Image (tube, rainbow, N blue to C red):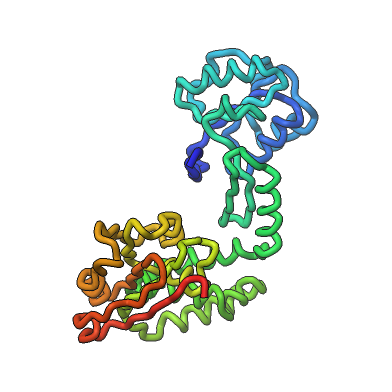
Amino acid sequence: MKYFPVFLDAKNISAMVVGGGEVATRKIELLLKATTHITIMSETVCVSIERLINLHQLTWLAHNYEQGHLTNINLVIAATDNALINEAISKEAIPLNILTNVVDQPELCTYITPAIIDRSPMLIALSSSGSSPILVRMLREQIEKTLPQGYGKLADFSYKFRDHVKARVKGLRNRRSFWESILKGPIGQAVLDGDQQKAEQQLIASIKQEIAPPSGEIIFIHTKNGNPDNLTLNAHRAMQFADAVFYDEDVNNELIEYVRRDAEKFLQTISSSILINYQHAIELAAQGQKVIYLLNGNEVLPKNAALADSDIATQVIISGE
């Protein structure tokens, strides 16, 4: 990755915007979605910025850029129409380890601002690392069309009951399955429809029911030629819910990006065409874990006595079929 994706805690932001025109206005409006700890440095400001200063009681240093004003600032945006001034701002800020963004000059930046889809508190950030803004815009339009405005309500609803569900539903995988069924089902729809009371009553009834502890299983996924675009829906879903994944160097490493990030990953030094590590997979599944075993190609699995004698549930998925 050329850029490391990260979300900053808004309460810790202390921002400086240098510039007083329309470009600076857009940057200030974006920052105001998260914080009012904003200082504007510019001898003159446009009407829009003046209104924002008065409305949100922002700090205004009514002079053009001068060095020495970045004390207690941790994020600076250079939005002037003078390339030399923007470069000077960058040269002052970067040695101070201040997050620095220079509009339309990525070579002077230490961060870039992604395209944002705001369903607060849910946020989706998209970036092409500066290589194709048009492609990002196209992708954003696709996501906007499929993402209901009420998804923020679902996030708030989940947060409200997170601790209650954690206390009642044991096992991380059980909780993931529980929440998926809640958010995709009638309760989630009630939240989207604005019937919060109905949703809360149904959720409380659901967590009062006895929920069995998670049972382990092993899913063997034949990845064939390893093309991630050929992953079936079943394979993708299994990888997203995995507790552990086994794979060897013959498996396309790009597929690992589709595995749940906090799943344990076990790279095998011996190719699965020679030896499959059944024993370790069985041990993890016996502990209630969902184990994924990624296999290159589509060779028939050899029979294993230990697996056959165990009561571990198994499944075989052929990716691309």
Side of 179 relative to 302 (left or right): right
Camera-nearest residue between 147 and 227:
227
Q: Which sits in the foreground, 298 or 263?
A: 298
**Image quarter for residue 304?**
bottom left
Q: Is residue 301 visible?
A: yes
Q: Is residue 58 left or right of residue 223?
A: right
The answer to whether residue 54 of the structure is visible from this angle is: no
Residue occupying image coordinates x 45% and y 67%: 224
Is 230 rendered above or below residue 100? below
Q: Residue 173, image x and y in percent?
A: 37, 71
231, above or below 88, in the image: below
Residue 98 image position (x, y, % from top left): 49, 27
* Residue beneath the point at 67% across and 53% down: 140
Between residue 114 and residue 65, name the one nearer to us. 114
Depth order, front residue of 187/138? 138
Q: Position of residue 226 (x, y in %)?
A: 46, 62
Of all residues shown, which one is farthest toward the right?
A: 47
Quarter of the rendering containing residue 63: top right
State the residue at coordinates (32%, 77%). 301
* Drawn side of residue 133 relative to residue 272, left or right: right
- Residue 223's place in the image compared with 44, above or below, is below
Which percent across, then down, holds residue 206? Answer: 46, 82
How many labels were placed on the picture?
Answer: 0
